[in-house]
Amino acid sequence: MKRLGKSDLRVSPVSFGCMSLGEKVTVYADLLRKAADAGVNYFDTADLYLKGLNELYVGEALKPIRKDVIIATKVGNQWRPDGSGWDWNPSKAYILKHVDQSLKRLKTDYIDLYQLHGGTIDDPIDEIIEAFERIKEQGKIRWYGISSIRPNVIREYIERSNIVSVMTQYSLLDHRPEEATLDLLHEHDISVICRGAVAQGLLIGKEASSYLQYTDGEVGRAAKAVAKVAAELGLSPLEVALGYVRGHPAVATAALGIRTTAQLDEAIDTLQHVEPLSADQRTFLRQSVRSFHYEAHR
């Protein structure tokens, strides 16, 4: 378990990204409870997912063990009345209203970690922070953070708020945070909740295809490098892909999107090998891909 930033939350090295859950009640409930029984204690959802039903499902499944788990959710994306899509709404009024709706769906009196689900440099950042601070004082949330890949946004919240975490995309195939944000977050004792650590499965056996700026050939070379290290260490490619991101001290947990029992079993197996890769192994993997930096929102 690793402490999440300056908070008193201690999170498992692998966490459950609930967005991938479907609508089959018995399936998602069994997966969530099995994960918790195996030692996964952090569950991440959002009011956006399935128009709020994802929160409802997670809340129902975890209610019997509520005090033993960490529930995180997100706010800021507002569904249109006709259901055709959603719009960005990070207003103070929206946050103050919708935290109550999330609490109701999650069947809980408090949310362990409440996150802004995105963000731009043009947002009313001070008002957003005021909203999070108010609901924290009210006891509706314990801690707050943001979900963002934008360095300029992340820097503003580091300087102006009391965030304890940033959820951001980070993997061997998207190592941009290494150049832009990871060291800064670690310096300020703000933890990273990593998403996308397996690059949509491309690093752990899925057929190579283009990803971000990389061609399918480049993706294939990265996957082969992961497989090589896995074979040398007697680990699975998943354990190596997770070991790469865990190599940075800012990373507290890696959220995996889990849909099936087989995926959950593999994720649970990685709990037995939570140590990060050696510096030499990380360097070998990093040298298998060309450098990649953020071009916008710097």
Image (spheres, rainbow, N blue to C red):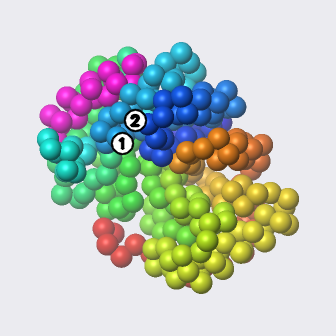
Count residues near mark 2 (Cα–Cα under 10 Å), then give few for <14, some for 14-19, many for 20+.
many
The residue carrying mark 1 is: 49
Q: Which residues are magenta?
A: 89-108
Q: Is residue 285 above or below residue 275?
A: below
Q: Within the magenta stretch, is there residue 99?
A: yes
Identified at 57% across, 58% down, the residue is 197
Count residues near mark 1 (Cα–Cα under 10 Å), then give few for <14, some for 14-19, many for 20+.
some
Q: Amino acid at mark 2?
A: Asn
Looking at the rendered image, the quarter that the C terminus falls into is bottom left
Q: Within the magenta stretch, is there residue 158?
A: no
Instruction: Tell me: 126 left or right of 191.
Output: left
Element type at mark 1: helix
Give residue 59's position: percent from left, percent from top.
44, 25
The residue carrying mark 2 is: 54
85 and 281: which is toward the camera = 85
Give residue 195's position: percent from left, percent from top.
50, 53
Q: Is residue 249 above or below residue 142?
A: below
291 and 223: which is toward the camera = 223
Q: Quadrant of residue 240?
A: bottom right
**Quick check: marks 1 and 2 in contact, CB under 8 Å?**
yes
Q: CA distance from mark 1 to mark 2?
A: 6 Å
Identified at 40% across, 19% down, the residue is 108
Q: Amino acid at mark 1?
A: Tyr
Element type at mark 2: helix
